[in-house]
């Protein structure tokens, strides 16, 4: 099940389950939209992959207890700010390749 992490790994901005600003890579590395667009250039610093918007888990129990009340968001903060210069070097060779071709 997707881990709904509570904040941006770089800037620690709060990313509650209902936000539309959380972005994830396939490994669930989680950053805010601003960091993905302005600092990461859509290159995950941990895997080199691209990001998509994190879906919102329903807060209502529409079906079979598949909702936030039964599967709450994670409360474990992963705050590992990047060395921005080092990321620029890392991302330089990757950012021009579409995420599905990396
Ligand atoms: Zn951020
Ligand atoms: Zn990643």
Image (cartoon, rainbow, N blue to C red):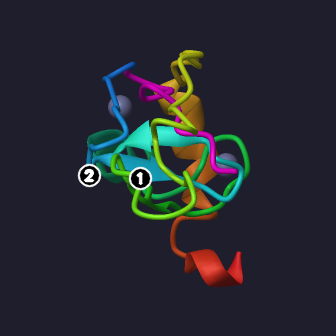
Of the two numbered discs 2 and 1 in the rendering, the one whose residue sits closer to the viewer: 1
Q: Earlier in the sequence, mark 2 or mark 1?
A: 2
Q: Position of residue 44 (x, y in %)?
A: 59, 49
9 on left or right of 39: right
Q: Nearer the viewer, residue 44 or 70?
A: 70
Specify the quadrant of the image occupied by residue 17. Answer: top left
Magenta-colored stretch includes residue 44: no
Determine if the C-beta at disc 1 is less than 8 A from ligand 1. no
Depth check, front residue: 76 or 27: 76
Label at residue 61: 1
What residue is drawn where x is 71% and y is 50%? 27
Mark 2 Cα shell of 10 Å, populated few (<14), some (14-19), many (≥20): some
Magenta residues (range):
1-11
Q: Position of residue 34 (x, y in %)?
A: 27, 43
**Is 8 covered by the magenta stretch?**
yes
- Which residue in the protein does label 2 denote? 20
Q: Mainly helix, strand or loop, the magenta region?
A: loop
Which residue is rendered at x = 54% and y = 24% of the image? 82
Q: Looking at this view, is 72 or 96 the one in front? A: 72
On screen, residue 95 above or below 25: below
Q: Badge 1: how crowded within 10 Å, few (<14), some, or many (20+)?
A: few
> Can you say which quadrant of the picture contains the C terminus?
bottom right
| Coordinates of residue 98 in the picture (x, y in percent) | 55, 80
Residue 37 lies left or right of residue 82; in this view the side is: left
Position above or below: 32 against 67:
above
């Amino acid at each position: 099940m997707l881990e709904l992490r509570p904040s941006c790994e770089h800037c620690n901005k709060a990313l509650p389950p209902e936000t539309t600003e959380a972005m994830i890579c396939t490994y669930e590395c989680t950053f805010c939209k601003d960091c993905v667009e302005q600092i990461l250039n859509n290159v995950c610093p941990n895997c080199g992959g691209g990001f998509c918007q994190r879906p919102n888990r329903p807060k209502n129990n529409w079906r079979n207890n598949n909702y936030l009340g039964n599967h709450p968001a994670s409360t474990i903060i992963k705050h590992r700010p990047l060395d921005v210069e080092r990321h620029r070097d890392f991302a330089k060779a990757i950012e021009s390749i579409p995420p599905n071709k990396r």
